[in-house]
Image (cartoon, rainbow, N blue to C red):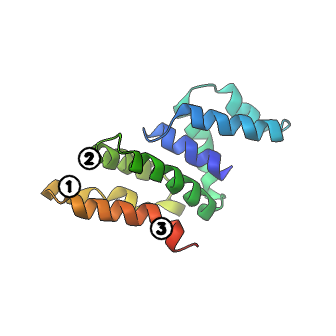
């Protein structure tokens, strides 16, 4: 469920795709066809806001490390693809951060989502890239 939540968050805030989310939801639903929550998500179709509203409260009881690994693993792909301008990437990360539950939002590396782009405001792209890199690599470095 943590990976599904991560994919939904990325999709909801312009950093991921509906296709990635739907593929994971379909996989989980095929493995657990009697799961009422997954059925509810399936029935919401493409209503991203409604889906995020149903999934995000579950982060309060989720394995935060698993959620973080999934989130920042996929976020790394988006970042390294360099298809989104750095400033826009930072804005999307900030929006994502503001939607995270309090249990998560002030923990490393999640807190970095809200400030890694700040050096761009004084023209320091290099420092922002260092912060984004540190954020993305957190689970590789800290969690093994």
Q: Earlier in the sequence, mark 2 or mark 1?
A: 2
Residue at 69% over, 49% down: 1
Residue at 60% over, 47% down: 5
Q: Position of residue 65 (x, y in %)?
A: 60, 64
Kindly indicate whether the residue at mark 2 contacts the one at mark 3 (C-beta within 8 angstroms).
Answer: no
Residue at the extreme front of the image, as rendered: 81
- Quarter of the figure with residue 4: top right
Q: Quadrant of the C terminus?
A: bottom right
Q: Is residue 3 above or below residue 124?
A: above
Q: Which element carries disc 2, helix, strand or loop? A: helix
Q: Which residue is mark 1?
A: 120
Tell me the distance, in whole angstroms, between the alpha carbons under discs 1 and 3. 21 Å
Q: Which residue is mark 3?
A: 138
Residue at 60% over, 37% down: 21
Q: Which residue is mark 2?
A: 87
Q: Which element carries disc 1, helix, strand or loop? A: helix
- Do we see residue 35 in this rendering? no
């Amino acid at each position: 469920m943590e990976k599904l939540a991560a994919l939904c968050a990325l999709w909801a805030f312009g950093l991921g795709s509906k296709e990635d989310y739907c593929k994971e939801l379909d996989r989980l639903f095929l493995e657990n066809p009697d799961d009422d929550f997954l059925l509810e998500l399936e029935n919401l179709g493409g209503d991203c806001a409604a889906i995020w509203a149903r999934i995000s409260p579950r982060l309060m009881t989720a394995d935060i490390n698993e959620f973080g690994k999934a989130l920042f693993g996929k976020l790394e792909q988006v970042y390294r693809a360099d298809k989104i301008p750095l400033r826009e990437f930072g804005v999307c990360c900030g929006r994502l951060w503001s939607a995270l539950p309090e249990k998560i939002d002030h923990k490393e590396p999640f807190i970095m989502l809200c400030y890694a782009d700040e050096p761009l405001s004084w023209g320091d792209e290099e420092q922002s890239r260092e912060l984004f890199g540190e954020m993305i690599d957190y689970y590789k470095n800290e969690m093994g």
